[in-house]
Amino acid sequence: MAVTDFFAGEIATELLRQLFLISAKAWKYKSTADNLIALIEDIQPTIKEIQYSGVELPAHRQAQIGMLFDTFEKGKKLTEKVLSSRRWNMFRQLTLARKMEKLEKTITNFLKAPILAHILADVHRLRADSEERLDRVDRSLERVIQQVGSMKIGGGGMIREAMKRAEAMEIETNDDLEKFGVGLELGKIKVKKMMFEAQGGVFGISGMGGVGKTTLARELERDHEVRCHFENRILFLTVSQSPLLEDLREHIWGFLSGCEAGNPVPDCNFQFEGTRKLVILDDVWTTQALDRLTSFKFPGCTTLVVSRSKLTEPKFTYDVEVLSEDEAISLFCLCAFGQKSVPPGFCNDLVKQVANECKGLPLALKVTGASLNDKPEKYWEGVLQRLSRGEPADDSHESRLLNQMEASLENLDQTTKDCFLDLGAFPEDRKIPLDVLINMWIELHDIDEGNAFAILVDLSHKNLLTLGKDPRLGSLYASHYDIFVTQHDVLRDLALHISNVGKVNRRKRLLMPKRELELPREWERNNDEHYIAQIVSIHTGEMNEMDWFDMEFPKAEILILNFSSDKYVLPPFITKMSRLRVLVIINNGMSPAVLHDFSIFANLSKLRSLWLERVHVPELSNSTTPLKNLHKMSLILCKINKSFDQTGVDVADIFPKLGDLTIDHCDDLVALPSSICGLTSLSCLSITNCPRLGELPKNLGKLQALEILRLYACPELKTLTGEICELLRLKYLDISQCVSLSCLPEEIGKLKKLEKIDMRECCFSGRPSSAVSLKSLRHVICDTDVAFMWEEVEKAVPGLKIEAAEKCFSLDWLDE
């Protein structure tokens, strides 16, 4: 069976994962999901034996396997739709239930025939025939390895000497492959599939430092299928941060052309005819180095690039993932005890807790496990406490893990490095709202939104954070408050490790590594001197007046308060933060918290950004201190409590410069308060995911500065007031998933500056005739079945794009 022809085992595993989630969360599908789980679990051992057999099956058998693969693939896509479906969309729920039943029937019918049994019999016969041939290949390969190991890189260095640099970076050697090669089988399969399906080209293995990229590359170098595919013509070179590029180029040229070393290397445009060969370039740091080393044009030549950054095209790059929990425990125990499980008599929970601090990162598991070898349990407890605070376990842990991880930051400019270090201000294992991050960088580092986003993408490409996959990301009118980034805990530990150097009062960032019941004692011991921190991050439970102590932050510009409680007294020292520009208050508890002592806002004259999450918004009154420079306010998962509806309160006086207001997932918002229309400085208004919002204020037309209006996912909103047509500066209107809306305002043609409308999943029966007057309109997103309504507008407005989005509840699958 060809590797390129069958990867159903991988899809089956993913499908099972999704089905278990459905069985646990979606009761409407539970019975069907449980039946499918039983069916797939029964055949999974057979699938795995066929998948990893390493033999070439006849074409008709591969076609039969392909039928099962297609079914699993469709099932995986279907389960993703089920998990993302909203409960209120009953039509879609019914449709998906019918599809699940059809999937069960299809798999049951396939298993009634003895197809898998026949395929397995062929596998056993072919594998026996191939054993003798593979033995001959292995003997030939040993001779090739000896020859390659003695080859010299131009300049006199040995290949094995160059490989030592990789060992210093990843602590991985050939001898480690058998010992530490857990969790890499899936990676091998995916990379082989990419390489085998193409006739040469450049492919990538990418991942954060210490995730096992070099180990995977070495495994591929030794893999017998790879050897056979490239007829043992494989070259492995380590490039490093300071490479001798011309020497490396000469060596690659000699390998590809068959010429002896010392011959002149031709121009980069030189083309040469040759057979299939594989060049593995490990530890590549820059695109410039990669371009220089891949400039030769050899048909059939495959280059595999191993890097901490994403240097190759995404579709040709495999991102190495961290180990699963079971794999991580096995590797950790192997390093700590010399066996793959916890020895009898040792505290099993303690081992799991320490291993979990490594978050599946192979390098962290190896280093931490090795540092605990032959250590008593009491010593382990101390290590666990240090790791939970983001501190190194011991000196060797610091030098072998954190210092090596820090190498990932060496090529960053100072602003980008500072932005990376800022990520340490957020709690571990929590999604970071992209909006909070971008606002913080804008205010702290004096950069604009475009540059902040570029830094975000750069850090993501270097695998220093994970950017959530969202189709809206990066588009001109994209919202960021419901898009998130994440970061591996070891990278967060690195940020904390660097930020916590020096005396606590002199640190640029004053951060609590984890949630505590009270403030750190170190802070209290040093509060007789002011703190120079620009970023202060506090993570606690419930706090009352007596839990705070006096602290002075004359330079603080960012304050992040994370807590888990239904009531919270704000810290009194906020009144002294005269430079504060960004305030983030996030309650991670189950219900909205009541905030006390809002009077401390009196001195926050420079505050520009306020983020409140899962709290009761305090009522505004004539005595509320104006926030004269507040530009952006986000209310997420909050209880609005008629805060803006107080009689006699002029909201514009309290927020005279507010330009961006977001109200998201606020389930008690029934009508948008008319007082908000007094905020004439608003350029962006987002009222989203509010399930009870039923009407908009009639004086909406007063918002003459408004350019962006988002009203998506408000299912009870039945009409758009005609006042919207008075918003003459409006450029973007998003009413997607407002399923009760039936039409656009008749005079929408008055919006001469409107550039984009998103109206997917709206039940429109027609469009206003005035829409042909929308001369600035460039993009309309709507459901497929209403796209025809815009054909006349498309003819009247040059350059207009009508994007027909697929309905989530399409019935096409049932008609196959």
Image (cartoon, rainbow, N blue to C red):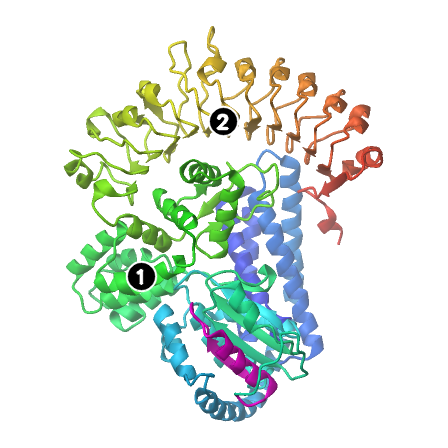
The x, y position of residue 397, in whole percent, is: 26, 62
Residue drawn at (53%, 53%) of the image:
18
Q: Is residue 553 positioned above or below 680 on the image? A: below
Examine the rendering and report whether any part of residue 211 can be seen.
yes
Q: Is residue 311 positioned above or below 86 on the image? A: below
Q: Pointer 2 and pointer 1: residues touching (CB < 8 Å)? A: no
Inspect the image, locate mark 1, and give the three-letter code of the amino acid beneath it.
Asn
Examine the rendering and report whether any part of residue 173 can be seen.
no
SS at badge 2: loop
Inspect the image, locate mark 2, and give the three-letter code of the amino acid beneath it.
Cys
Res 345 quadrant in image = bottom left
Residue drawn at (27%, 65%) of the image:
369
Would residue 766 be found to the left or right of residue 424 on screen? right
How many numbered dots are placed on residues in this image? 2
**Residue 236 falls inside the magenta stretch:** yes
- Label 1: how many residues lie within 10 Å, few (<14), some (14-19) or many (20+)? some
Q: Which label sits in the foreground, 2 or 1?
A: 1
Which residue has dot 1 on it?
403
The x, y position of residue 274, in whole percent, is: 65, 84
Residue drawn at (28%, 31%) of the image:
554
Q: Which residues are magenta?
A: 234-261
Quarter holding the C terminus is bottom right
Q: CA distance from mark 2 to mark 1?
A: 45 Å
The x, y position of residue 750, in whole percent, is: 74, 21
Would residue 388 be found to the left or right of residue 298 on screen? left
The x, y position of residue 143, in whole percent, is: 48, 93
Which residue has dot 2 on it?
666
SS at badge 1: helix
